[in-house]
Amino acid sequence: MNERDKKMLPSTKLKRQKSSTVKIKSLESIYLVTILKDCVDQFAILGHIMPDTFEGTSQEKQIIDNVLKEAVEQQQDMEEKYKAALAQKQKSKAEKFSYRPSQADNNKFHEVAKELGRSTLQFARAVEQNPLTSDNIVKINEDRQYVQDIMENVVSDLRKNRSFTSLVSAVAKAKKTKRGLQETIEKEQNSHQRLKELTKLVAEVTEEKEREIQNRNEMIAYLKDQIQEMKAKTGMESKYVNKCTKLSVAQTQKICQMAEQHIRKDIDNVEIQLDLETRVNAEIVQYLGKLQMRLDEKLEFWMEKHEKDVEDKQKQLDDLKTLKNTDWKRLVDLTRQYKEYEEVVVEDRIQKEILRRKMEEEKLYIKASIRVQAWWRGIMVRKGYGTYRKKKKKTKNTKKSKGTK
């Protein structure tokens, strides 16, 4: 509806009528027929200019963004409503002694949960479907044609009867169709939920029976294995006892022989090691004697060197002590001289500071006196004191004026 159509509307708004057969004024019907006829023409033009698909056009991205944005906003609104209802229910449970939730609150919560489920299903379908396919364009054209037909029927009804009977019947029919679709969807959802529950129950029962049969089969197999094991165990025990006795006798004999051979080998090894140790001991004693002689010679050398190094270091220490004393005396003299110079410098700085302050005070006094003199001269000039007094001049005009008075 453009601005021209809005201007053509009557100034008074149409009130809601209880009956659809109430007729309106002829002038208002003309206004409405004109507006609706313009809308029908615009719908017809839209049907002719609308493309078969928006894929590959410049508006492709914008259409997809708008569809997704609308679906996301609707889903967020439903989630916020569900969270608010859930919080209210939890609050009522926490305050169950002071507040008891009514049946209306429970029904409201279940309605919000159902609406959230439907919204989630619609959101999933909106995400899965492509809004740019030809099926969506066909659906839009069908809806446009449906609205165009309704508007044409309303126009003809307004021209003939000046009423909205066809529009009311179309709205009632649409509501009835929507109600039937909602009931069908709810029935389908309930049956689908019941089918899921029954399928889950059958799967649980089947799994339990299969587990029970498996446990029984495992128990039967375990008992059979135990019987076979007992039979084999009795036959093997008799054979094992006979073999053990024979093996124990042979083992003891073998152990005794091996122990005797081992002891003989140990005796031979000990005799060889004893000869080796005696020879090594004699060589070590000879080596240690030579090493002791070399160490005695080194000890004498290092003792002589130690005495010489001690004498040299003592001389160096004495020289350093004398040098330290002379340096200390010089440091004391320099310190005393530094203090004297510092006192002289401090006195000089104090005198300079006093002179600087006196000069600054004199400058301030001079500046203040100059300002006072300037101020006083200005007053004398403005007030006319002293040498700056103005002389009075008597003119003829003043005399004439006095004569007239």
Image (cartoon, grey):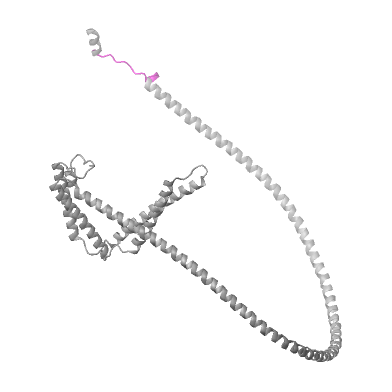
Give coordinates of residue 398: x percent, y percent. Answer: 25, 12
Magenta stretch contains residue 387: yes
* Spot occupied by residue 1 in the image (x, y as percentages of width and height): 20, 49
Position in image of residue 233 (x %, y %): 68, 83
Nearer the observer, 111 or 137: 111
Q: Is residue 182 left or right of residue 145?
A: right
- Is residue 358 shown above or below 293? above
On the rendered structure, is 21 left or right of 309?
Answer: left
Is there any visible trace of residue 278 in the rendered image? yes
- The residue lying at 29 percent from left, 15 percent from top is 393
Q: For this rendering, which residue is in front, 402 or 213?
A: 213
Q: Residue at x 49, y 69 (%)?
A: 206
Part of the protein shown in magenta = 384-396
Residue 266 on the magenta segment: no
Would you say the magenta stretch is mainly helix, strand or loop? loop
- Residue 270 in the image: state x and y as whole percent: 84, 88
Does the image show residue 123? no
